[in-house]
Amino acid sequence: MNIDLRISPADSLRVLLIYQFFGPYHLARWQHWRGVATALGWTPLALQLFRKPDLYQWQPSGDQEHCFVDLGLETAGRDRLAWRDVPRLIGALQRLRPDVVVVNGWGMRDAILAHLWCRLSRMSRVVVSDSQAIDFSRSALKEGIKRTILSGTGSAFVAGEPHRRYAMALGVPASRITFGCDVVDNAHFRPARLARQLGWYRLLSVARLAEQKNLLSAGSAFLAFVANRPAAEPWQWSIAGYGPLQAEIQAMANSSGGRIRLLGAVDYADLPATYAAADLFWQPSRWEPWGLAVNEAMASGLPVLVSARCGCQEDLVTDATGWTFDPLDEDDMTRALNRAADAHAAWPAMGRAAAELIGDWDLPRFSEGLAQAVRLAMASAEKR
């Protein structure tokens, strides 16, 4: 592990951002945040835990400059820290000497250890959260444990309104909550936006092929919807992604008569072209803490159909940008598809409205929200 401690004056505020792995989304945020933090006179530090992610096919970033530390740990399955690696994580925290630690969530072993280390070291911390109350059934015991873990947290940096409410339910005061942790680099998707012509009915989903994404149920709803639409509407639903349900979803596509296509894994670099080839975006998840693919679709100028259990829908989906539906009710999914189809002539204008709205959910929102969370955490520590 190569840690350069000569990168700033000793009195510079050292802010440590921890991710299990810096995929393309995290890397874009980190690069923007690094510039903002440096301009504020702070020392931004990044700690990547794992050599590669367990769930995603992301490649190493190559951005490991002097303030980026890569522990290169192996996962213990499902992106969990192995007990044997606990001393290495604690050692890295001690050597980096942060003034503020930005901890992602509270559920994974590495996050719990970071929270405990901060408490024992009397270190200021910011908790990052895109959890919402409706994601899972909640037990009083587990919620009590979460409140204990978060006790003394200086501030919370959350995704949107549902996540703010849940952070408050776990004991974080509203006055110490900021927004913007879930954004994408809008510029990465914007250049590929094309002038879309009426007459096309190309539906797109970008998702892991996993149970929570609800794609098999969505397929039933889609085929029921298509069966009752005019023959003049050439509907096709493309699904970009990979995951454990690939065989089942491929079988669904094979039996759809060409109405459903499985595109397979699409690299981050190729996603803009994938969105550019679509006319309407569909996110049918049974649960989704936020839903970054919705950000991507809107940045690409697409109107969106978004599950009511998707964390972003309250902040991003309006009558001008799209529709919501109950993902547990196939009939309601079909009704939502019909509402979208009946508004076909408005899709270009809705895509423009979506791109305009998502313009406020870009990398500066992340950096500004995090900077404010750091200030609040430091102010909270001064009062203790």
Image (tube, rainbow, N blue to C red):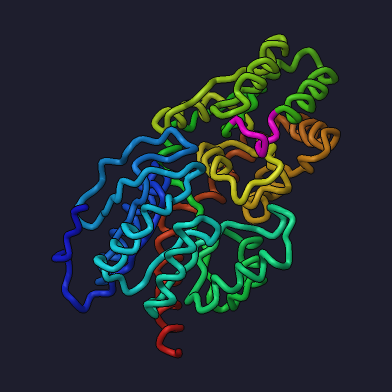
- Between 13 and 113, the one nearer to me in the picture: 113
Q: How many marks?
A: 0
| Residue 180 colored in magenta in the image | no
Q: Is residue 260 above or below residue 115?
A: above
Outermost residue toward the bottom in this view: 383
Q: Is residue 331 left or right of residue 136?
A: right
Q: Is residue 222 left or right of residue 22?
A: right
Q: Residue at x 45, y 90 (%)?
A: 383
Segment tinted magenta in the rendering: 209-215
Task: Pinpoint residue 350: horizontal percent, then vertical percent.
Answer: 64, 40
- Between 1 and 257, the one nearer to me in the picture: 1
Q: Is residue 152 above or below residue 362?
A: below
Q: Residue at x 47, y 45 (%)?
A: 79
- Between 339 and 13, the one nearer to me in the picture: 13
Outermost residue toward the left in this view: 6
| Residue 214 colored in magenta in the image | yes
Q: Work out whether residue 199 can be spotted.
A: no
Q: Is residue 341 left or right of residue 356?
A: right
Task: Pinpoint residue 36: horizontal percent, then vertical percent.
Answer: 31, 63
